[in-house]
Image: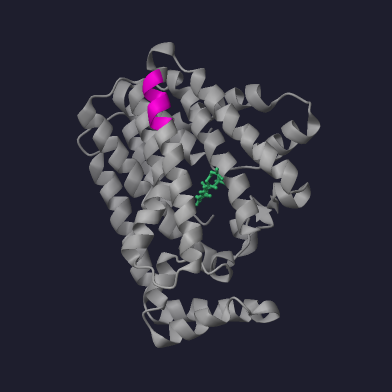
């Protein structure tokens, strides 16, 4: 019989907690879209990180379950609004909420999921709520800043790798850091421990986003469960995009994307071949590896326990992910 991991057990409890928030039936146009997305099979990475961070510090994660649910809700809310903003049709292999229902339903259910996130946070042990609120709210602000920069960059011609890294550290890595910091806070971590765990989240999140950008090009729609090549069509300044624009051929292919229409699949194939041949894919993979290793390094000093083993395992799982 397969051994149930520490993380799997924690996630089961998070799922039960989430159900208490979204299980209600009416109003149908509020609860149904929320359930539709939340039960569509997200990886629950951020919730897992909250629990593992808590368990790394104290050996326990039960008190961190509401905070884990809160982070997962905030993440899901951001996906609903991001899909509206990017006009994406697919999420987790299903039609996005605005596609299946409409934008009004998607905006409101997104707001609702965000409100539930605060409700979940508030279900944490009373003593730690002020500390959690501070981290969570700052993380939410940072997330919005990252998203705003991402949209601004679509229109700006000259973005540097440094700009890009700063943007993704806000848009994506901040929530990974928040997850780690919340788990640490619930378990009463020292400030040194907090710092190491936040660093873990930052590097894991940076690697995750750079990898997400790469998967948008090299994966396929059925594996990824979302629109493929959508970053290139939207003119998003991803890591791969920025490296490609350093070459003449790369610039030429990328310039064709916005108006490609029906030829867009062929163009994506050309671009895929190009980044492989030019070593851009390899360079991107090296950057991902660098951040993954930095994440691992930041928790080296914690004493060995099952949570540490599973955090190491999680880094490798994310590293090898296909979606
Ligand atoms: C709109 C007011 C307002 C605030 C939200 C929309 C937004 C600000 C931020 C969006 C940030 C965003 C969507 C970042 C992308 C992060 C990312 C790569 C998500 C995919 O995460 P996975 O693969 O998803 O963990 P699953 O489906 O597994 O949960």
Indicate the position of residue 316 as horizontal and vertical percent values.
38, 49
Q: Is residue 228 above or below residue 313?
A: below
| Extreme residue toward the top, this view | 126
- Nearest the eye: 102 or 241: 102
Q: Quadrant of residue 62?
A: top left
Give the left or right position of residue 169, taking residue 33 as reference.
Answer: left
Assign the magenta stretch its main secondary structure.
helix
Give the left or right position of residue 234, taking residue 205 as reference.
Answer: right
Residue at 44% x, 18% y: name it. Answer: 63
Q: Quadrant of residue 161?
A: bottom left
Which segment did they paint magenta?
A: 130-136
Q: Quadrant of the C terminus?
A: bottom right
Say if residue 3 shows up in the picture.
Answer: no
Say if residue 228 shows up in the picture.
Answer: yes
Indicate the position of residue 233 as horizontal and vertical percent values.
58, 70
Indicate the position of residue 11 as horizontal and vertical percent values.
52, 30
Indicate the position of residue 252 as horizontal and vertical percent values.
49, 86
Residue at 54% x, 65% y: name it. Answer: 231
């Amino acid at each position: 019989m397969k051994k149930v991991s520490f993380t799997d057990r924690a996630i089961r409890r998070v799922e039960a907690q989430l159900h208490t928030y979204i299980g209600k039936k009416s109003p149908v146009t509020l609860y149904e879209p929320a359930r539709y997305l939340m039960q569509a099979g997200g990886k629950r990475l951020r919730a897992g990180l909250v629990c593992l961070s808590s368990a790394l510090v104290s050996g326990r994660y039960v008190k961190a379950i509401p905070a884990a649910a809160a982070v997962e809700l905030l993440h899901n809310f951001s996906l609903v609004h991001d899909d509206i903003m990017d006009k994406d049709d697919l999420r987790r292999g299903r039609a996005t909420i605005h596609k299946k229902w409409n934008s009004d339903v998607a905006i409101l259910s997104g707001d609702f999921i965000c409100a539930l996130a605060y409700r979940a946070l508030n279900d944490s042990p009373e003593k730690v709520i002020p500390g959690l609120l501070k981290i969570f709210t700052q993380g939410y602000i940072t997330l919005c800043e990252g998203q705003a920069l991402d949209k601004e960059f679509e229109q700006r011609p000259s973005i540097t790798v440094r700009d890009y890294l700063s943007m993704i550290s806000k848009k994506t890595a901040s929530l990974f850091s928040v997850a780690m910091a919340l788990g640490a806070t619930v378990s009463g971590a020292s400030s040194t421990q907090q710092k190491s765990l936040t660093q873990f989240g930052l590097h894991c999140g940076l690697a995750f986003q750079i990898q997400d950008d790469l998967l948008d090009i090299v994966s396929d729609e059925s594996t990824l469960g979302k629109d493929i090549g959508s970053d290139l069509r939207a003119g998003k300044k991803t890591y791969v995009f920025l490296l490609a624009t350093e070459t003449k051929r790369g610039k030429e292919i990328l310039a064709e994307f916005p108006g490609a229409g029906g030829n867009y699949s062929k163009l994506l194939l050309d671009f895929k071949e190009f980044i492989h041949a030019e070593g851009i894919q390899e360079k991107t993979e090296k950057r991902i590896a660098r951040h993954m290793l930095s994440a691992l390094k930041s928790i080296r000093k914690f004493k060995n326990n099952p949570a540490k083993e599973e955090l190491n395992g999680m880094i490798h799982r994310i590293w090898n992910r296909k979606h």
